[in-house]
């Protein structure tokens, strides 16, 4: 995945994502948009995004997701690869939105005006 152009990974029905996408549209920012629920991440792609971020797969977990509790991710020990496989299978586990601009990563609630 080339990172020449800014991109936002989001979920169309997520309220936080809707606010960020709306702000991007309002500011007429040229950014690629991808709903990763409609166009899911591959394991390879998610690994690359996480590696580029400098964060761990655990940092990308959305702890409020029901699968987080069902998989008992807080109390059980999993490898980074296992966590990535869970996120590929259950994209709701991925914290969102993810905004990548000039190799800068912003995950979760983000103030767009601070990025541009």
Image: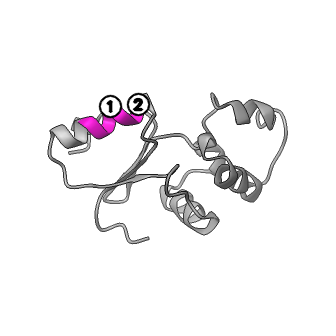
Q: How is the image coloured?
A: one colour
Magenta span of residues: 16-22
Location of residue 75 by image quarter: top right
Under circle 2, the secondary element is helix
Q: In this view, does 44 lie above or below 55?
A: below
Residue 21 is one of the magenta-drawn residues: yes
Q: Where is residue 48 in the image (x, y as percent from the top left)?
A: 54, 65
Q: How crowded is mark 2: few (under 14 residues within 10 Å), some or many (20 or more)?
A: some
Would you say 71 lies left or right of 84 here?
A: right
What residue appears at the point 46 percent right and 36 percent down from the top-left corner?
A: 108
Q: Which residue is label 1 attached to? A: 19
Q: Position of residue 62 (x, y in %)?
A: 60, 36
Q: Position of residue 41 (x, y in %)?
A: 55, 59
Under circle 1, the secondary element is helix
Q: Is residue 56 above or below residue 26?
A: below
What residue appears at the point 67 percent right and 46 percent down from the top-left corner?
A: 90
> What's the magenta bit mostly, secondary-structure-wise?
helix
The reply to whether the C-beta atoms of the residues labelled 1 and 2 are less than 8 Å apart is: yes
Task: Name the foreground residue: 75 vs 21.
Answer: 21
Furthest residue to the bottom? Answer: 2
What residue appears at the point 26 percent right and 43 percent down from the top-left corner?
A: 115
Q: Residue 16, labelled with which disc?
A: 2
Quadrant occupied by the C terminus: top left
């Amino acid at each position: 995945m080339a990172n020449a152009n800014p991109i936002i990974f989001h979920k169309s029905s997520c309220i936080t994502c809707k606010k960020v996408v709306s702000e991007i549209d309002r500011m007429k920012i040229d950014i690629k948009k991808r709903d990763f629920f409609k166009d899911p991440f591959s394991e390879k792609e998610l690994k690359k995004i996480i590696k580029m971020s400098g964060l761990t797969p655990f940092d990308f977990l959305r702890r409020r997701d029901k699968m987080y509790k069902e998989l008992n991710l807080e109390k059980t020990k999993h490898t980074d690869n296992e966590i990535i496989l869970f996120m590929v299978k259950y994209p709701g586990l991925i914290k969102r939105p993810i905004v990548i601009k000039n190799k800068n990563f912003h995950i979760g609630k983000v103030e767009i005006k601070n990025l541009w």
